Image: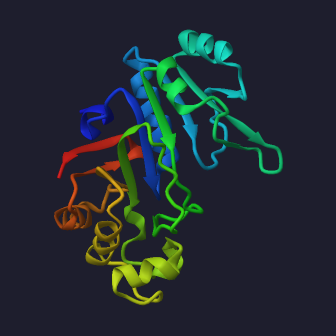
Amino acid sequence: MTLRELLKIQSGVTAVIGSGGKTTLLRTLGAELAAEGHTVILCSTTKIFPFDGIMNLISPEEQELSEAVSRHRLICVGTLLPETGKLSAPEIPMVRLAQMAEYVLVEADGSARKPLKAHGEWEPAIPPESNQTICVVGLSGLGRPVSEVAHRPERFAPLAGISEEDAVTPEAAARVLNAEGLADRYLLNQAEGRRASAEKLSALLNRPAAAVSLKKGVYEPCL
């Protein structure tokens, strides 16, 4: 089963939020779609590093981007932030990006490299053109203290009903995700060796979930 099938990815704009594998999902899903013959644009409404091995276009004109997508099928586009080397949102409007490629995959969240997170009032930055929001959850955060594994632990802990020094259980993680209600579908990443935890968490969520190990290329059917 492919990631596109597993996550029921449709053409148009898909927003990816959460923690524990967003950028890896963009790259892996984008490469998969391009290999199937589709055209794909990767971008962010927050900040991402340019992708190795993929053409990264910095503030291109629409004609330049359109021609590049036709030639290469998989393109990353954004606006350079010189102080960090990261790319922020493209200058070309999202609605135009969706007209230039069959699929636009947008990293719409930040997580400071933590496997779990709770969102600030200003997050996530989901574009209004998005037809689906996938929330990535890093299963490596389970069984460890909130303070170590959660981005914005001061928000995560109250939603989870535990303290910042308590270990995150599947039940606690589910309380956070269900309370926020930001996703159409969950991607439980880092699942290899954590199948029982993935199944327990999935059963508690109020939206469909799939268990994967993106870096291992291991994808399971929806739980």
Q: Position of residue 155 (x, y in %)?
A: 48, 78
Q: Position of residue 54 (x, y in %)?
A: 61, 27
**Nearer to me, 128 or 217:** 128
Q: Position of residue 57 (x, y in %)?
A: 69, 26
Q: Residue at x 53, y 74 (%)?
A: 152
| In the depicted structure, whether residue 132 falls above or below residue 167 | above
Q: Quadrant of residue 173?
A: bottom left
Q: Residue at x 60, y 63 (%)?
A: 112
Q: Position of residue 44 (x, y in %)?
A: 57, 42
**Nearer to me, 3 or 14:** 14
Specify whether 91 is left or right of 24.
right
- Asked which colour scheme the image uses, the reply is rainbow
**Nearer to me, 119 or 122:** 122
Report the number of numbered marks: 0
Extreme residue in the right direction: 83
Work out which quarter of the rendered image holds the N terminus and state it: top left
Q: Residue at x 52, y 52 (%)?
A: 125
| In the depicted structure, whether residue 16 falls above or below residue 123 | above
| In the depicted structure, whether residue 83 falls above or below residue 178 | above
Specify whether 56 is left or right of 192.
right
Q: Residue at x 51, y 78 (%)?
A: 153
